Image: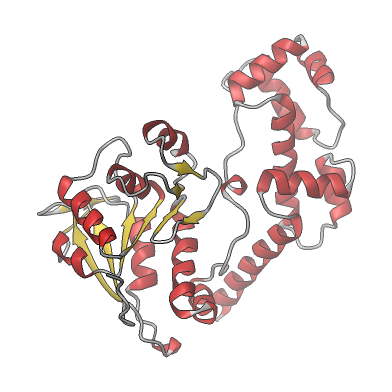
Amino acid sequence: MKIKDKNKLVVSVAYDRLGTFEFGCVTEIFDLQRPELDVDWYRFAVCSAEGGTLRASGGIRFEAPNGLEILDQAHTIIIPGWRDPDEPPPDALQDGLRAAYARGARICSICSGAFVLAWSGLLDGKRATTHWRFTDKMKRRFPTIQVEADSLYVDAGQILTSAGSAAGLDMMLYLVARDYGSRVANRVAQRLIVPPHREGGQAQFVSRPMPADESGRLSRLIDWVRQHLDRPHTVASLADRAAMSPRTLQRQFRESTGLSPYEWLLQERVALAKQLLETPHVPIAAICEQAGFGSEESFRHHFRRVARVSPSSYRRAFLQTQGDVAEGATA
């Protein structure tokens, strides 16, 4: 049975040791009334996977107003994270989610909340994502899931999963656009002072790898290269500077960063290029030179391959967000 009522009920699942940021994002999107939009906005409810007083990050204690039975009425169910990917959720929650899915409810997760769906069997054979820190764990524990490690969110039809906490906002704005159209979603994004759509994937946000031997030759080499990214570098020249053989350099780079020297150098150059793109008036030619790319064509190719977004799109999205923040600060 598909639920088609216009005033859609969204239910967020709370649990002990709840992540307050993810939960706050859900309430911001679906619970906050928006009379300026002139649409029949969502109804919103919170239910608890466990009874009694629950704890949340920041030392908060609270009680959810509903039990799991409200899942039977939900059009959309949101799982805002989960306390431990290795811990199966309560059987009652798994049963409630499976029953909701069977009757046609839309089920969504933010960050580690995807593991609640995975434990419930709802992601078997489906495309899904989670935070990049947990994608390998999900692949190992649930091999039938088609894990898209670099996606900000994945729409698999009735089930949607999102990556880290902020990617949950991307997914929920996407849901608003599906339900009410892009005009309404854009106005919600404007009120939040976030882009209505972010291009690219999680690769834009993964931290730069740090070496394990903080006091060793490789660490000193990495510090030096980061100060001289504009210079040409080869495995041979890097090995010579570190007083290692090329084979030893390759091995230590792989052990310390998980990357080859070439891939590490490319990520460092793209990281510097991002910083320069965030400055409005630095021309592309200067960015290519400072980041060590041989040509604009090479720069655009490698930037898109690493960041999963073009340099112009990255700059546009960043400057748009900054402009919205400045406008909001003076409003």
**In the image, residue 174 above or below residue 145:** below
Relative to 33, 313 lies left or right: right
Relative to 86, 291 lies left or right: right
Q: Position of residue 321 (x, y in %)?
A: 61, 67
Residue appearing at x 78%, y 15% in the figure = 239
**Quick one: quadrant of the N terminus?**
bottom left
Q: Is residue 240 shown to the viewer in this render?
A: yes
Relative to 74, 305 lies left or right: right
Relative to 183, 241 lies left or right: right
Q: Position of residue 277 (x, y in %)?
A: 74, 55
Q: Is residue 82 shown to the viewer in this render?
A: no
**In the image, residue 255 above or below residue 68:** above
Q: Position of residue 194 (x, y in %)?
A: 54, 67
Q: Quadrant of residue 248?
A: top right
**In the image, residue 251 above or below residue 100:** above
Q: Position of residue 227 (x, y in %)?
A: 77, 34
Residue appearing at x 68%, y 43% in the figure = 306
**Quick one: quadrant of the C terminus?**
bottom right
Given residues 300 and 161, the one toward you in this image is: 161
Q: Quadrant of residue 3?
A: bottom left
Residue appearing at x 65%, y 69% in the figure = 320
Given residues 240 and 30, the one toward you in this image is: 30
Describe the colour scheme in one phrase. Answer: secondary structure
Residue lying at the far front in this picture: please name it: 1
**In the image, residue 23 above or below residue 40:** above
Residue appearing at x 84%, y 19% in the figure = 237
Given residues 14 and 60, the one toward you in this image is: 14
Q: How many marks?
A: 0
